[in-house]
Amino acid sequence: MSADYHVHIENGPCTIEWLKEFINSGLSKGLKEIGISEHGHRFIEGYNVYKSDGFRTEWVKGYMDQSIEEYVELIKKAKALGLPVKLGIEADYFPDKEKELEMFLKPYPWDYVIGSVHWLGDWGIDLEESIEEWKSRNTDEVYIEYFDIIEKMAKTGLFDVIGHIDLVKIFGFRPRPKTFDKIRKNIEEISKTGIVIEVSTAGFRKPVGEIYPSKEIMEMIREYNIPVIINSDAHYPEHVAFEFDKAYEYVKSFGINTLYYFNKRNKTPYQI
């Protein structure tokens, strides 16, 4: 029995019927509960968090078409019906937007909050339309900037989980081995915060073709005894618990046998 806490229902209607397709898919694969964690950039209430002076604002305007109230009420209704769901959100972190983010998140009864970094300023590092930017950048410097922001995100106390911690590798651009010496310092600092790191099978569906995080990062997670959970980053019902058997074996290969359930921003361990 386990959980998948990184599930997006955004590719369909905000209805119980659509939600049940994700739940039933998860239950059929042996999950105990499913956490829905819509992207913060979907909600008009999050505009002040995501806006910038450049491309990011234009990109976000194409997605902010929903009220967060509608989403929260859907999950509350599902809970009232006895469905095994949790209320989460995947919120982007921007180093200069902590106050705006806190105001955005505070009113709602989250079971957990996933923090992710998809943007370095106005550059969407995982956007296919921005891949040319990678070719003009120093990959080592990108990794260093990215993991510095991940560390800052963990230290804000606004998040419970770090999503796909090395998303920066999505298109296969890799740093030189010595760059991981610097990243190790980031991971050590992250270990002091108590935040959980997500092991995500979404990487199997991306150009990089491998799980998040990499073996290099997983070694550090084990070294600093950082708690982990396994998620799928599902965007369709069939992706719930995607390749979880591989993920279980992956974390076990690093001597990790404990995952966590979330409820009202608190985590409870369970064994795999």
Image: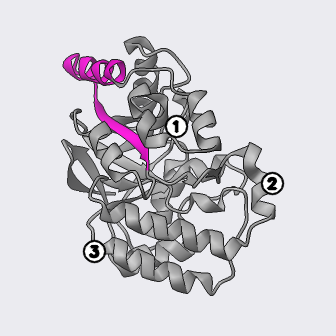
State yes or no: discs 1 and 2 in contact (Cβ < 8 Å).
no
Is 18 situated left or right of 203 in this image? left
The residue tagged 1 is: 234
Which element is circle 2 on?
helix
Residue range in magenta is 69-92
Regarding residue 214, the answer to whether it shows in the image is: no
Task: Reply above or below: 261 against 104.
Answer: below
Task: Reply above or below: 19 against 87.
Answer: above
Q: Which mark is residue 132?
A: 2
Which element is circle 1 on?
loop
Of the two numbered discs 1 and 2 in the rendering, the one whose residue sits closer to the viewer = 2
Answer with mark 1 or mark 2, whichever residue precedes in sequence: 2
State yes or no: discs 1 and 3 in contact (Cβ < 8 Å).
no
The amino acid type of the residue labelled 2 equals Glu
Image-quadrant location for residue 35: top left
The amino acid type of the residue labelled 3 equals Lys
Answer with mark 3 or mark 2, whichever residue precedes in sequence: 2
Regarding residue 196, the answer to whether it shows in the image is: yes
| Residue appearing at x 66%, y 46% in the figure | 205
Q: Which mark is residue 122?
A: none
